[in-house]
Amino acid sequence: MATENETDAEELSGRTGLIRQAGRKLTDRFRTNLAASRAFLKSRRANGDADTPVHGYRYFFLTVMVVFLVAVVLDNPVGAYRNQWPTDVLKWAHRLTDIGKSGWILVPTGVFVLACYFLDWRGLQARTRLTLAKWVAASGYVFIAVGMSGLIVAIAKRLIGRARPVHFEELGAFYFQPFSNASFASFPSGHSTTSGAFFAAIAIFFPALRFPALVLAIWLGFTRVLVGAHYPSDVLAGLAFGAWYAYFTALFFAGYGFIFKIDKNGLPVRRKGYELQKFLLQR
């Protein structure tokens, strides 16, 4: 019996050793890939478009004025009407509104990027590395644009503390209670921020899809009004901030000459080939 126990202990020790060895190998790969990425970004900085003038700030301040106007004109009437939308319209709104949750975007893009950092890129063919790197770059951009804009809004809406439409009858459309619960986190809309960032990213990557991306973003944002979760100004502010953040994230990437470049109008456009060939062939 003692011999059997010793054998089991040896097998367990051997398995543990293999797991540790595999873990160290994955950790080394992650560190190597991370260092290579940092070196690549540093080398690309000198060839980026950081000094190119951009004009997004005018769009941002104009949007602030429009949001204020919408709040003054529409929020009270819409708040009073919130329980009177047609039943069929509400059914579709409830089915579609959660598309605006960030998880379905952040989880696949984040997991994909993280998994690729554990790959042994040197064992892949050059063409495979190039294709994979393009997907990593695009996924990383979308993850940052959606994730960071959502995080900023999640903090801001608690600081602002605007009452949601569910409190309209008792508190009105312009009651604020900062640092309270979720029912006082109406402005801006988090779902709309996600929609704005994601569909703006789509529009930057694929200019031909700008109009359908805009329509889908507005429709998904409007579902938040239909289900009684937000006022129109909440939705507009969320859509605008998400789109603005995706735009400036693209400019930040363009500053490193990575994924995007800035055109003569100061707008980010997709860089052909992402300029990754040299980087990949040197790894």
Image (tube, rainbow, N blue to C red):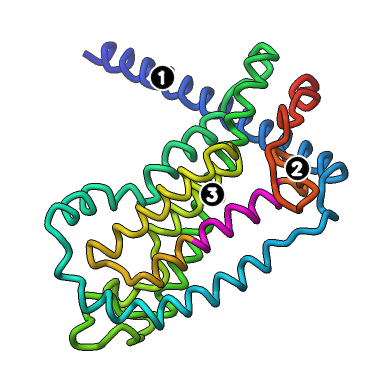
Crowd around label 2: few <14 · some 14–19 · many ≥20 (10 Å): many
Q: Is residue 103 left or right of residue 143?
A: left
Residue carrying label 1: 15
Where residue 261 is drawn, which disc sits there?
Answer: 2
Q: Amino acid at mark 3?
A: Ala
Residue stretch in magenta: 240-253
Residue 273 among magenta residues: no
Question: Residue at image x 52%, y 39%?
Answer: 209
Residue carrying label 3: 200
Between 269 and 153, the one nearer to me in the picture: 269
Question: Residue at image x 54%, y 44%?
Answer: 210
Q: Main secondary structure of the magenta part?
A: helix
Crowd around label 3: few <14 · some 14–19 · many ≥20 (10 Å): many
Question: Does label 3 or label 1 sit earlier along the sequence?
Answer: 1
Describe the element under mark 1 as helix, strand or loop. Answer: helix
Residue 244 among magenta residues: yes
Q: Amino acid at mark 2?
A: Lys
Disc 3 and disc 1: Cα gap in Å? 48 Å
Between 78 and 111, the one nearer to me in the picture: 78
Residue 165: x percent and y percent?
25, 75
Describe the element under mark 2 as helix, strand or loop. Answer: strand
Where residue 164 is drawn, which disc sits there?
Answer: none
Between 20 and 280, the one nearer to me in the picture: 280
